[in-house]
């Protein structure tokens, strides 16, 4: 992240209690409820226990004239315990039908939790499918981080945000620990485009509506699923075995990149030029982090002024138009968000307290890119930040455990990147870049923690590094020395 169906009658299955465990009628298997949270210390009710999601199949329709989102979500999961009931994270939208393995199941809402009781206990190791039909007007989240989630734009909608966004538009196990593959089908008024993650399987029109079908085969955390609906110029091309889809709002081509230079290049032209550098940027990043972890790429830019941040939505980051005020800033933002495809997407967080593993790494890649272009040096950037007075609030946030209120504080980005540079100075360039590449390779597709990174750095360097990481990551004060 850059700083910044028809109604089906429902029948409840009879549940009786036996020795403290629930037994669903006819199952003969004792089960217990899944936990209402996955165990994140910052967000106790994010995610859920008792199952792992394998796949989400979303079949949705959105009407910008009414702001109503409707359709169904089929969630394929595997039970990790004998499961008498389980939760999904889902907010606000009205449910018209819910089934488990094709049979109506009882459910209730408890705040942001959708509590589901199947007619039979789900056995450990069994796969099951929850299908939810729903509709309504999704809400935009307004919290300490600003606005995020479901944005209603002038001609459509954007769905983008972190850490909580998925539950505003589909039922989910909404935590990075539980990644899954996706099929996302979006039906929108003819003349509009609907952009999402992964591969565009095709689009088809029927009367006044067009359906766009996207498939993301590589597992991803739910918050990285993106939906962008509106008028977009969509370009597709391939480079180095990667298929790119770029979607730009045509209105960007009527807007000057620099308002003080109304006859200068447009935002659309700068964004197009910046996107054209994606293959170059990926090749350069691959030299640092190893092969690009996905088969597709690209980006999305809407002219919606309410979007105040970019986000590394998997394979297709979304950017606010303002970052393309110059080709330099546009390329730098692309380095940051594409860098996240390794550090944040392929390597995802085991808990939100480890956010520096996303943002510190992506920020350090920005520094390396600027040095690569001869614009400055990483050492100069580090020294400039280190000159920040000890009493400045910058030093009061420990990036290794910033607390939920400081999840996207500057310190998480910059002190996180400074931690990497302090490590580089301590172990030398050859060892440092070996650590980065091995981190990306050895943890590919996994949820990661700070402790795992520290262990890896110590193993490869042959050095004890607890003091370095304590001072730079976990101490809310200015380190006494590099």
Image (cartoon, rainbow, N blue to C red):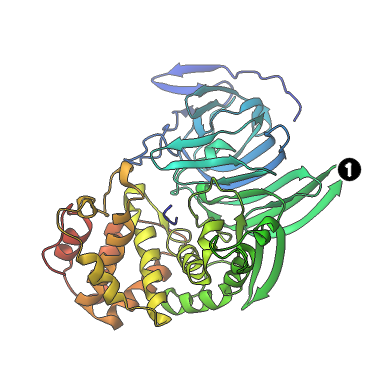
**Residue at 66 percent of width and 59 percent of height:** 248
Secondary structure under tag 1 reads: loop
Residue at image coords 58%, 41%: 151
**Residue visible at 51% across and 75% down?**
281
Res 320 visible: no
Closest to the observer, 151 or 270: 270
Q: Residue furthest left?
A: 480
> Is disc 1 surrounded by few (<14), some (14 to 19) or many (20+) residues within 10 Å?
few
Quarter of the image with the C terminus is: bottom left
Which sits in the foreground, 378 or 407? Answer: 378
Residue 328 vertical placement versus 116 (above, below): below
Question: Is 10 placed left or right of 141 in the picture?
Answer: right
Q: Is residue 72 something that shows in the picture?
A: yes
Answer with left or right where residue 225 lies relative to residue 368. right
Q: In the rendered image of this protein, does residue 378 appear above or below residue 250? A: below
Q: Can you say which quadrant of the picture contains the N terminus?
A: bottom left
Residue 6, how many percent across, how many down? 76, 27
User: Is 57 drawn above or below residue 259 in the view shown?
Assistant: above
Residue 95 x/y as whole percent: 63, 26
Q: Which residue is mark 1?
A: 207
Numbered circles on residues, count = 1
Q: Is residue 411 above or below residue 293?
A: above
Image-based side of 325 in relation to 369, left or right:
right
Residue 12, position as x, y percentages in the image: 61, 18
Kindly indicate the quadrant of the structure image that contains residue 130: top right
Q: Nearer the viewer, residue 335 or 226?
A: 335
What is the residue that sits farthest to the right in this orientation?
207
Pinpoint residue 372: horizontal percent, then vertical percent: 41, 81
């Amino acid at each position: 992240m850059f700083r910044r169906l028809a109604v089906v009658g429902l029948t409840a299955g009879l549940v009786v209690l036996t020795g403290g465990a629930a037994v669903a009628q006819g199952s003969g298997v004792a089960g217990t409820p899944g936990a209402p949270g996955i165990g994140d210390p910052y967000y106790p009710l994010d995610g859920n226990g008792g199952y792992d999601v394998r796949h989400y199949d979303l079949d949705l329709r959105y009407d910008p004239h009414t702001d109503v989102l409707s359709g169904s979500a089929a969630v394929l999961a595997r039970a990790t315990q004998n499961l008498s009931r389980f939760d999904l994270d889902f907010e606000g939208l009205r449910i018209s039908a819910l089934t488990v393995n094709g049979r109506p199941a009882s459910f209730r809402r408890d705040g942001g939790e959708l509590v589901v009781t199947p007619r039979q206990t789900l056995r450990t190791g069994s796969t099951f499918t929850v299908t939810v039909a729903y509709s309504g007007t999704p809400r935009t989240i307004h919290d300490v981080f600003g606005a995020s989630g479901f944005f209603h734009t002038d001609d459509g909608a954007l769905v983008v945000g972190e850490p909580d966004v998925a539950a505003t538009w589909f039922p989910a196990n909404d935590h990075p620990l539980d990644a899954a593959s996706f099929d996302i089908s979006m039906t929108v008024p003819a003349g509009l485009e609907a952009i999402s993650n992964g591969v565009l399987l095709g689009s088809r029109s029927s009367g006044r509506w067009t359906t766009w079908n996207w498939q993301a085969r590589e597992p991803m955390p739910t918050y990285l699923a993106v939906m962008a609906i509106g008028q977009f110029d969509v370009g597709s091309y391939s480079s180095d075995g990667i298929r790119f889809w770029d979607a730009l709002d045509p209105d960007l081509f009527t807007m000057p990149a620099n308002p003080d230079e109304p006859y200068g290049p447009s935002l659309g032209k700068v964004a197009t030029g910046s996107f054209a550098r994606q293959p170059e940027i990926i090749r350069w990043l691959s030299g640092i982090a190893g092969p690009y972890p996905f088969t597709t790429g690209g980006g999305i830019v809407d002219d919606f002024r309410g979007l105040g941040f970019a986000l590394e939505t998997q394979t297709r980051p979304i950017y606010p138009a303002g970052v393309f005020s110059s080709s330099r800033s546009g390329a730098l933002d692309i380095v940051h968000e594409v860098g996240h495809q390794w550090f944040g997407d392929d390597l995802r967080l085991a808990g939100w307290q480890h956010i520096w593993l996303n943002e510190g790494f992506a920020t350090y890649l920005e520094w390396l890119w600027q040095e690569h272009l001869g614009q400055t040096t990483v050492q100069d950037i580090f020294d400039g930040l280190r000159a920040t007075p000890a009493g400045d609030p910058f030093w009061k946030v420990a990036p290794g455990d910033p607390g939920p209120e400081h999840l996207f504080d500057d310190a998480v980005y910059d002190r996180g990147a400074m931690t990497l540079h302090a490590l580089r100075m301590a172990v030398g360039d050859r060892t440092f870049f070996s650590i980065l590449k091995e981190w990306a390779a050895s943890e590919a597709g996994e949820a990661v923690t700070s402790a795992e990174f520290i262990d890896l750095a110590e193993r490869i360097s042959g050095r004890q590094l607890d003091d370095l990481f304590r001072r730079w990551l976990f101490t809310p004060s200015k380190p006494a020395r590099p």
